[in-house]
Amino acid sequence: MSAPPRRSPSRDLKTLLASRHQLLVAVGRDEKRLLDLVRGVADPLGLPVWTWTVAAGLRRSGQSGAGVTGTTDLASAVEFVSESNQPGVYVFLDAGAISDDALAARRAKELSSRPVPGRTVILTGLGSAVPPALAPEAAIFRPAPPSTADLAALLDRAAAGLARSGMSIRLSPTARAALLDSLRGLTLLEAERLIVEHTVLDGVLGDDDLAGIRSAKAQLLSSDSPLDLIAADVNLNHVGGLETLKTWLAERGRAFEPAARRFGLPLPRGVLLTGVPGTGKSLVAKAIANSWGMALVALDTGRLHGSFIGESEERLVGALDAVEAMTPVVLWIDEVEKAFAGTGDADGGAAARVLGVLLRWLQERPAGVFVVATSNDVTKLPPELTRRGRFDEVFFVDLPGPNERAAIFAAQLGSRGWDPARFDLTALTAATEGFSGAEIESVVVGALYAAYAKGVDLTTAVLAAEAAETVPLAVLRAEDVTALRDWARGRAVRA
C-alpha cells in the first residue's frame, strides 16, 4: 500500500504566515519537527523564532541564557508578546492550560484585534480543535507526519547504527515497503525507537517483526484516547460457518498485497455486520485483523461523551486522527448503534454531532483503515450509516444452520483439547436448533464444568444434557429475531 500524496508542511506554514494569521493552533505530537518547520520557514523571511515553556518562559531561539523574566506565567507571556509589537514567530509549547486560563485566552484573542505584520503566535498541546474562547481568531495548522522518504532515510541510518553494534536489519523488499507503510503517522523519534526495540530483541529486524511493530504502534497511538488495542488471536479458520462472508474477506484481504496496487485494485474500506446477538460478529473482527496481519483497535463509544459542549466531538476527532496514523489497521466499532443513542435534544445534540463527525469520516477516511462495525439492533441504526460509500458491504449474520453448528461445536471442542471425532456432532446439531454460536460455546463450557465436577469424561450425552437446559435467545426473543430477518431481507447479504 502506497502513501497518499502529501502537501508540503513547510509550504502550508509559509502560506499561513504570509496570510498574516496572528494566532495558530498546531495539532500533532512531534514538537521537534514543528520547531524545525518553523525555523525553516521563518529564517529565510528574516523572522526571529521565540519559544515558550512553563519551565523557562519566553526565550529567543539561538540565544543562550535565561528566558524573559516574569514570562513563565502563560498570561504574562502572551501579554509580553502583545505589547512588544515585534515581528516574529512565537511558539508556545504545551499551552493547553490556556483553555482554562481566561486571562491568557483573552489576551491571545486580542492579538488579532491589534495585528502586527510578521507576528504569529503558535500554540501547541491543545488537542485537535480550537478552544471556543479563541475561535474564530485562531487557525488550525496540522503538520504532515514524516513522509515515506523521511522514514526510509531513518531506516537506513538506523541500519547503519545497529550494524556497528553487531545487529542487522534483514528485510525483503516487500517487507521493507510494508514496514515503512506501518511507521507512517509516527514521529521520527517514535519510529526509530520501534525499529531499535524490535531489533535488539534477537539482534535482527526481519519480516516476522512486522506484526509486532504494528501492534506496538497501535498501542502507542491509542493511549489516552477512546481506543483500545485488542489482541487478535484468532483467524478466519476459527470462525464456524459464515462461508459467504469469509470468501468475501479472503478476496478483499489480497487487495493489501503490493501487486494489487499495480493491478489497480482499491483498498477495501469496511463492512457493517448486523444480526442476532451471539452469532460471532465480534469474533469476525478479530479474525480479520489476525488473518490480514494488522493491528485491531476498538473504538469505545462509551468513552466518547464528555460533559462540556464540543468535548465529545473533539474526543472522536482525536481518536480518528490516531486511527488514520495507524494505517494499515482494522477499526472495530462494536454495537455501533449505542454511539448514537439519544440523537434528539436531551443531550444538547451531542450524539447528533458525534454522528455527523463519524459519518463524514466514514465517507472520507483514507485508504488503509478497514472498519468493522457491528450492530445487534438495526432498528436504532441511523439510515445514513447504511448508505453505500460508508461500507463496502452490509452482511446479515443469522443464527447458524446445521452445518455451521457442527463446525462451531468442532471448533469449540478442538480449542479445548477435545477431539471432535469422539462426539456425535449430528446429534448435538439437532439438540441445538436455534442456538447462536455464543450459546453453543456456553453449552460446551457448561458441560465441561459438569463432567469435571462428576469425575467423568466429556461425552455427547453430557453436552446434550447441558443443551437441554439452555433456552436460546431465538426462543426468548422470537419476535426480535423475526424482525431482524425481515429487515435484512433485501438490505443485506446473508453471511
Image (tube, grey):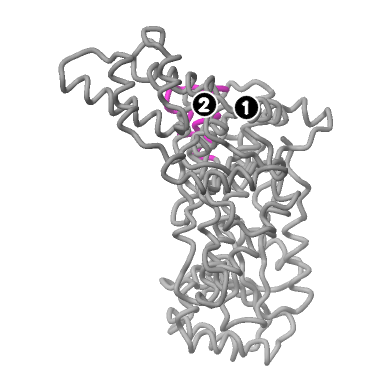
Find disc 2 in the rendering and name its residue: 239
- Residue 471 drawn in magenta: no
Amino acid at circle 2: Val
Q: Nearer the viewer, residue 84 or 212?
A: 212
Identify the disc placed on residue 246.
1
Residue at the spot 46% in from the left edge and 83% down from the top edge: 101
Q: Nearer the viewer, residue 45 or 218?
A: 218
Residue 316: in sight, yes or no?
yes
Residue at the spot 52% in from the left edge and 41% down from the top edge: 276
- Within-10-Å neighbours for mark 1: few <14, some 14–19, many 20+: some
Amino acid at circle 1: Lys
**Is 232 rendered above or below residue 21?**
above
- The answer to which image quadrant residue 85 occupies is bottom right
Question: Horizontal and vertical percent for residue 308?
Answer: 48, 76
Secondary structure of the residue carrying numbered label 2:
loop
Question: Horizontal and vertical percent for residue 379?
Answer: 59, 55
**Is 64 rendered above or below residue 229?**
below
Q: Which residues are magenta?
A: 192-214
* Mark 2 to mark 1 CA distance (whole Å): 9 Å
Q: Is residue 279 left or right of residue 384?
A: left
